[in-house]
Image: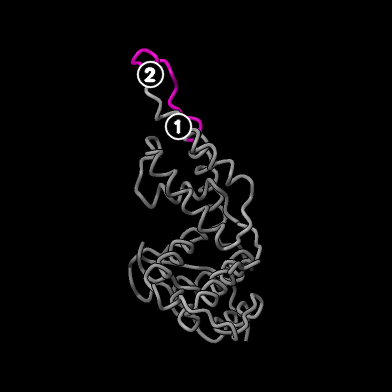
């Protein structure tokens, strides 16, 4: 069954490459192009299967990776190898420059400005830490895609049955998640998926969460690489 839902992907292809490099603890100056290409293509196929509307830049980077991979598979003579530039060099340059600007933007955005996110930021940090000294990091779309893939992998046959009589809509699921976030201080990703264990319900929950993050209405945090993902309202409502 196809889910005809389109939404803009709000992090670009270089974000995905940096995410994969961080995830596999790879030296950005010595990228194993075969591994990164296969991982990148797997994420692209995953997002396509969810009918996420991919920007052309994703496909351009995919073509670039495949081109680099093909060049690196061609055997070269020692003399030619010494003269020829590493096929990965231009991509590495783009990634390093992009990472530098992104980190600068994140550092600037982290500065507390009067009247903007001050209360919400403290609320999130406090609730996430729970008195622990573990560092908390905010996560994005690719971490959620990874968590989503793990849910589908571990759920197995439990989610194969479709419930035709039950009707879902994206706006309805968004409203349900917002209502739950308003009632509780924090909700884990697993808890949000817990009541929607058929395939359609899981996909709609995932897409609704992506839409809320894109609209800056919800934020996701994680303490450990494989720990629970906790979802918060971006701004706490006044009571």
Q: Is residue 96 above or below residue 204?
A: above
The Cα atoms of the two marked residues, 1 and 2, are separated by 15 Å
Q: x, y percentage for residue 182?
A: 57, 83
Q: What are the residue bounds of the magenta stretch?
A: 76-91
Comparing 127 with 17, the one in front is 17
Position of 178 with respect to 40 (left or right) is right
Secondary structure of the residue carrying numbered label 1: helix
User: Which circle's residue, 1 or 2, is located before the other in the chain?
Assistant: 1
In reply to whether residue 223 is colored magenta, the answer given is: no
Can you identify the residue that label 1 sits on?
Answer: 70
> Given the current orientation, which residue lies at the most extreme top position?
79
Q: From the viewer's side, name the closer residue of 67 and 179.
A: 67
Q: Quadrant of residue 146?
A: bottom left
The quarter of the rendered structure image containing the N terminus is bottom right
Along the viewing direction, whichever of 134 and 161 lies nearer the viewer: 161
Report the coloring of the rendering: one colour
* Front residue (pair 103, 77): 77
Q: Is residue 227 visible?
A: yes
Q: Please determine whether, in this image, residue 137 is positioned above or below residue 99.
A: below
Q: Residues within 10 Å of mark 2 (few under 14, many from 20)?
A: few
Q: Is residue 82 magenta?
A: yes
Q: Secondary structure at mark 2?
A: helix
Q: Position of residue 77 (x, y in %)?
A: 35, 16
Q: Quadrant of residue 34?
A: top left
Mark 1 nearby-residue class (10 Å; few <14, some 14–19, many ≥20) = few
Picture quadrant of residue 118: bottom right
Which quarter of the rendering shows the C terminus?
A: bottom right
Residue at 51% across, 60% down? 140
Residue wearing tag 2: 81
| Residue 130: percent from left, percent from top | 38, 76
């Amino acid at each position: 069954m196809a889910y005809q839902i389109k939404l803009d992907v709000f992090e670009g292809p270089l974000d995905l490459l940096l995410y994969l490099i961080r995830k596999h603890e790879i030296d950005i100056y010595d990228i194993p192009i075969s591994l990164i290409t296969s991982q990148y293509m797997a994420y692209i196929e995953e997002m396509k299967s969810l009918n996420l509307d991919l920007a052309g830049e994703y496909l351009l980077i995919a073509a670039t990776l495949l081109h680099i991979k093909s060049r690196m598979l061609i055997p070269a003579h020692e003399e030619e190898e010494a003269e020829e530039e590493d096929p990965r060099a231009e991509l590495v340059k783009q990634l390093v420059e992009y990472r530098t600007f992104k980190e600068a933007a994140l550092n600037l955005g982290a500065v507390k400005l009067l009247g903007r996110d001050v209360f919400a930021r403290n609320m999130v940090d406090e609730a996430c830490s729970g008195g622990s000294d573990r560092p908390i990091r905010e996560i994005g779309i690719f971490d959620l895609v990874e968590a989503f893939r793990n849910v589908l992998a571990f759920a197995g046959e439990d989610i194969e049955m479709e419930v035709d009589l039950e009707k879902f809509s994206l706006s309805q699921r968004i409203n349900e998640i917002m209502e739950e976030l308003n009632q509780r201080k924090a909700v884990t990703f697993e808890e949000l998926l817990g009541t929607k264990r058929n395939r359609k319900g899981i996909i709609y929950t995932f897409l609704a969460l992506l839409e809320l993050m894109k609209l800056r209405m919800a934020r996701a945090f994680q303490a450990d690489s494989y720990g629970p993902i906790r979802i918060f309202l971006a701004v706490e409502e006044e009571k």
